[in-house]
Image: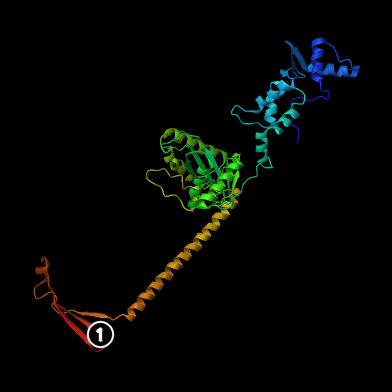
Amino acid sequence: MDPLQVAEEVVESSPNKLEDIYRLLAEGSFPSSFCSIKKKNLKRYARKFTLEGGCLYYVGPKKEEKREVVIDPEKRRHIFLESHLSDSGHHLGQKKTVNRIQSRYYWLGVVKDVIDWIKMCETCQNAEYHKTPSKKCKPVRAIYPWEVLGSAVHGPFPPSLRQNTHVITVTDFFTKWTEAVSLPRNDALSVAKAFSTIFYRFGSAKNIYINQSWDFCEEVSRKLGEKWNILQIMTASHTSEHTGLDDRTYNELKSSIKNMVTEHQRDWDEHLDQVLFEFRTSVNPVTNYTPFYLMFHRDIQPSPMTRTEEANRHAPMSQSNDDLLLYLSGMQEQRKAVREMVLANLSAAENQERKIVDRSQKTSQPVTSMVQDHLFGEKPLKKFRHDPLMAFKFETVLHTGENSPVVENTG
């Protein structure tokens, strides 16, 4: 493991180096075993320290700092425990722990002590087991809609009337389309149920990144398989690069959700779609298209009560959006091919229906009606125009054969 950078250079010395410096500053004496060279080195190194009120402090070569020198091993361990835990109770890493210790205290070998103590910390070792090998997150690339999703759980919020306290957002890496589902609690079953709702609407994805632990991801996947028979790969993520959105848009989404909860505290879970609508119909700064257009390949139909003038405008495409250009070009060709196929199917169905009608007309017996003269009687039609009832006399000739007509009188 690469050593961490420390504030000063540590000089090789005996384990009792600090005790020797304390004795030199307090009594002006050297250990009896020291030769002249060791005495000279100790005296030069002691210039970085000062003694006040019986306590030894490290001030550095330029006297610009003042840190308490800790010699007692038990006190060092106690200082480590205080510095290793953050104010919120989270365990800090090696570098942050060392920096917190060195901001107030000094002892030789502080870096090595911190590394050894963290190795014995069970919580840190469990977290280290699930860390990715690479410190730098590899960018996630999606080449078609709903291939890779980024998910995050937000909250807790004040309980709504439906007793929901959290919100889970799911964003498509390609189209930037975002879904949101309210949760009664932040547990594996609630999250799995939310994912099942989204699955039945859009289908599964190759991978879903979520801002939870690996154990949580495994539990959610197990719940999806047991209760909904859904096989879904999930990956734990603790970085903003796996949200599916750029940092600015993601922060705006979180802020919008919080503002909505503040504005509608009793029924905030019923207003999530209103928040999402603004993001779905706005041009994304990364894709230069609206998520709605990339998801459904059509513009949103504006409503008189909503402002969507800007929703259907697409920004000019840049050279960095080669994948989008290729996808949209393919979609246009596919839509054209599908449209032609649908029109051909409709035309074929009409032709088939016409053939069936023609065939039925050839096999059926013709019916001929013969109307007598003076159908409306001798009186002019004007006199019968307002009569409520009218009677007519006509003949119906049914051809049962080629030469044998049958005449029926009806009156």
| SS of the residue under disc 1 | loop
Q: Pointer 1: what residue?
A: 400
Snapshot quadrant of residue 261: top left
Q: Nearer the viewer, residue 17 or 325?
A: 17
Q: Is residue 110 left or right of residue 280?
A: right
Q: Is residue 257 above or below residue 396?
A: above
Q: Nearer the viewer, residue 71 or 24?
A: 71
Q: Residue furthest front?
A: 226
Snapshot quadrant of residue 212: top right
On the image, the x and y values in percent for residue 328 come to 54, 55
On the image, the x and y values in percent for residue 343 come to 44, 66
Give the crowd class for mark 1: few <14, some 14-19, many >=20 residues within 10 Å. Answer: few
What count of labels does the image hold?
A: 1
Dot 1 amino acid type: Thr
What residue is rendered at 8% in x and 73% in y? Answer: 379
Q: Nearer the viewer, residue 332 or 122?
A: 122
Q: Is residue 248 left or right of residue 339?
A: right
Snapshot quadrant of residue 111: top right
Q: How is the image coloured?
A: rainbow
Q: Is residue 57 above or below residue 194?
A: above
Q: Is residue 48 left or right of residue 267?
A: right
Q: Quadrant of the C terminus?
A: bottom left
What residue is rendered at 41% in x and 35% in y? Answer: 266
Q: Is residue 350 left or right of residue 173?
A: left
Q: Is residue 150 visible?
A: yes
On the image, the x and y values in percent for residue 373 come to 14, 79
On the image, the x and y values in percent for residue 1 come to 75, 36
What residue is rendered at 60% in x and 40% in y? Answer: 213
